[in-house]
Image: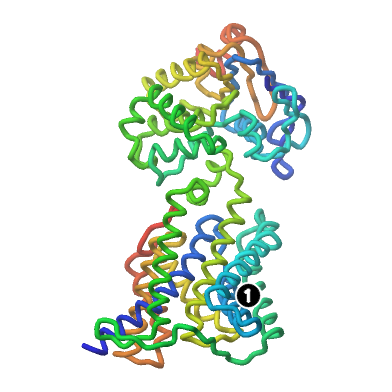
Amino acid sequence: MLELKGLSVAYGSFTAIESIDVLVQKGEIVVLLGSNGAGKSTTFKAISGLEKPRQGEILFEGKSIGGRSPGRIVESGIVQCAEGRKLFPKMSVSENLIMGAYVHRKNKKAIKHSIKHVYELFPILYEKKENAAGSLSGGQQQMLAIGRALMAKPKLMLLDEPSIGLAPLIVEQMFEVIQQINEEGTTILLAEQNANAALGIASKGYVFESGSIVVQGTSEELLSDDSVRKAYIGA
Amino acid sequence: MDILSQQLFNGLTIGSVYSLVALGLTLVYGILHIPNFAHGAMYMLGAYVTLTMMLLWGIHYWLAMAVSVLVVGLLSVLMERLVFHPLRNAPPIHDKIAAIGILLFLEALAQLIWGADYRSMGTPYGEVINLFGLTVTMQRVLINVGAVVVMLLLYLFLKKTMVGSTIIAMAQNREGAHLVGINTNKVAMLTFLISGGLAAIAASLAAPINLVFPGMGHLVILKAFVIIILGGMGSIPGAILGGYILGFSESLGATYLSNDYKDIIAFLLLVIILSFRPKGLFAREGF
């Protein structure tokens, strides 16, 4: 479904990711592991069209999407739920969700239907639907960010560190919801530092280190790989 | 008492004009963080276009104003495309320099086309009426009503339409706007279109009670900056409230303090308010 072929992205003279290859099949959950600054977010930005690739190709459903505008990429079915959530802080929860469906703005009925679905996934958002997004707790904001991404009805959802800064119990819920979204038919590419939880729901993973992929394999392989265990699981 | 209420009405009138100009300025600042000094030139051009339409082709005042809104709005978009868009990744000081450059260029251009003379604009609404015991011209009533109608329309557009919401969304979180698929280039152009249109409306409404000349935008843009700093940079309610505060203090100051120094009041007010509320009356963070 999504294929990165020899993708490189640079900020000025600094090469953030160098010649990486990633393959995501339809229906999978794939995880990108790595510490801060390893290149996970840059990869996501390149896929979303926020950064232009310097080299290599980004193929989505067989078509090259490298260099397309962010808006066109959302329309083609890739939506990113970015690190830091990037919500509209002074808009209410429901307004944020409606903005999430921007690419479907002509179809009012579908928007209503999607909102209902998001409220079913996250009942707390329904309770807080009139509150400003900026007034929510961290976990609720993360739920809203995922909900807003869902409103665009993505075929592929990019989730950048959804567990960051959240209490363990909330993290567990978050991963359950991600699994549920995947079961409903959305392919998921997940960037995480929480390797244990992420590999628990993913089918395969890639480990990033200073801009390159150093290890890749199925979740079982990575969980039993000594270097991965040492670096990301702490056992 | 008579003088007081007359001056309050005058303050309301000046405030209406200031608010309209400041709104255009604050919209652009909120979205792109560009302090658009050239907005004063847009105001000046708005008055000239309306005046030219009326004198040259004898078009009716309202129609001339509509043409002016369109012309200045499109010029404003052109300015964004040709100047500010190419500078989007440059250090912020470049925007400021470019904006001042556009201001000087457009003023010189206006002087070349229309000459440096002070001109007055006629209005079909020159008659004097009695309003609750106040003697006012119809044009002044029109300025007040017109400004309120425009502000209401702008509010409804921003809050109730999807296109309007994209402007607010972009002001609150630019990257978030990208991520939901909003084309931020289009939003920037739309914002400049509205901003230019607002300047043209303000100028066309105010010109009949003032004079039209190439430098007419100077004091207005300086005061509009004072207003949006007072109101909190990028805040819409701040721009409206700030405009009226300034209008009232100027007209009252001119009557009870000194008419010669009325233009300094804006800047005194700025010093006083910023001493107590350094972030302005309304803190920013997107409208």
Coloring scheme used: rainbow
Label 1 resides on the chain identified as B
Task: Give the camera-side residue of A110 and A167.
Answer: A110
Which residue is tagged 1?
B103
**Residue B110, above or below A209:** below
Task: Give the camera-side residue of A122 and B61.
Answer: B61
Say what amino acid the circle numbered 1 marks. Answer: Leu
- Residue A13 percent coordinates (x, y): 74, 43
Residue A219 visible in rendering:
yes
Q: Quadrant of residue A10?
A: top right
- Residue A21 percent coordinates (x, y): 73, 22
Q: How many marks?
A: 1
Residue at screen point 42% across, 26% down: A118
Report helix, strand or loop for mark 1: helix
Residue at screen point 38% across, 57% down: B283
From this viewpoint, which residue is outermost toward the left? Answer: B1
- Residue B165 percent coordinates (x, y): 48, 48
Residue B171 visible in rendering:
no
Task: Give the camera-side residue of B237 and A214.
Answer: B237
